[in-house]
Amino acid sequence: MTKNAEYILEIINNSKNHPTAEQIFLLLKEKNEKAVLATVYNNLSWLYGQGLIRKISAEGNPDRYDRTERHDHLICRCCGRITDVMLGDLTAELQAQLGVRMLSYDLRMNCICPDCQKKSNNAP
């Protein structure tokens, strides 16, 4: 693993904010001023392919990156805000119901976050 890949993995694993590639790039530049955005995208692709990070895609929003620690996500349909949620592990239940060996799953639930609900309720 290259130094840049190590830095990027460290940035993602230490973040609770699901950073975009551009946000990761800005943080990487603090450690390696010669880094370019293509380096970030190439390393994100490699890290994702190796199963070392998760990619969260939500329609109309840039991809975001996350640690692989077991957790699920609420994604606001209005603003794109992503919130971690800790639900029980459904692996055994899914395996029994589907009759296949589950390697992993990624549960993303669409919602309207409290801030957007407030804006909607206050709209004229």
Image: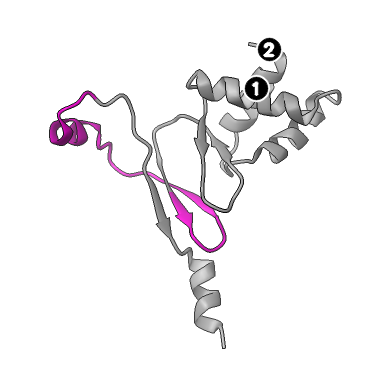
Vertical comparison of 20 with 119: above or below: above
Vertical comparison of 106 with 3: above or below: below
Highlighted magenta segment, given as a residue range: 74-101
- Who comes first in sequence, dot 1 or dot 2? 2
* Neighbour tally class for label 2: few under 14, some 14-19, many 20 plus, Cα within 10 Å: few
* In front of the other: 11 or 108: 108
Q: Quadrant of the N terminus?
A: top right
- Left or right for 95, reference 113: left
Viewer-nearest of discs 1 and 2: 1
Q: Residue at x 14, y 36 (%)?
A: 97
| Residue 72 found in image quarter | top left
Q: Residue at x 67, y 28 (%)?
A: 41
Q: Amino acid at mark 2?
A: Thr
| Residue 7 found in image quarter | top right
- Left or right for 74, reference 79: left
Kindly state the secondary structure of the residue where label 2 is placed.
loop
Q: Position of residue 62 (x, y in %)?
A: 61, 46
Marks 1/2: CA–CA distance: 9 Å
Q: Position of residue 21 (x, y in %)?
A: 67, 36
Q: Quadrant of the C terminus?
A: bottom right
Q: Position of residue 99 (x, y in %)?
A: 14, 29
- Left or right for 71, reference 44: left
Q: Which mark is residue 43?
A: 1
Q: Which mark is residue 2?
A: 2
* In front of the other: 45 or 26: 45
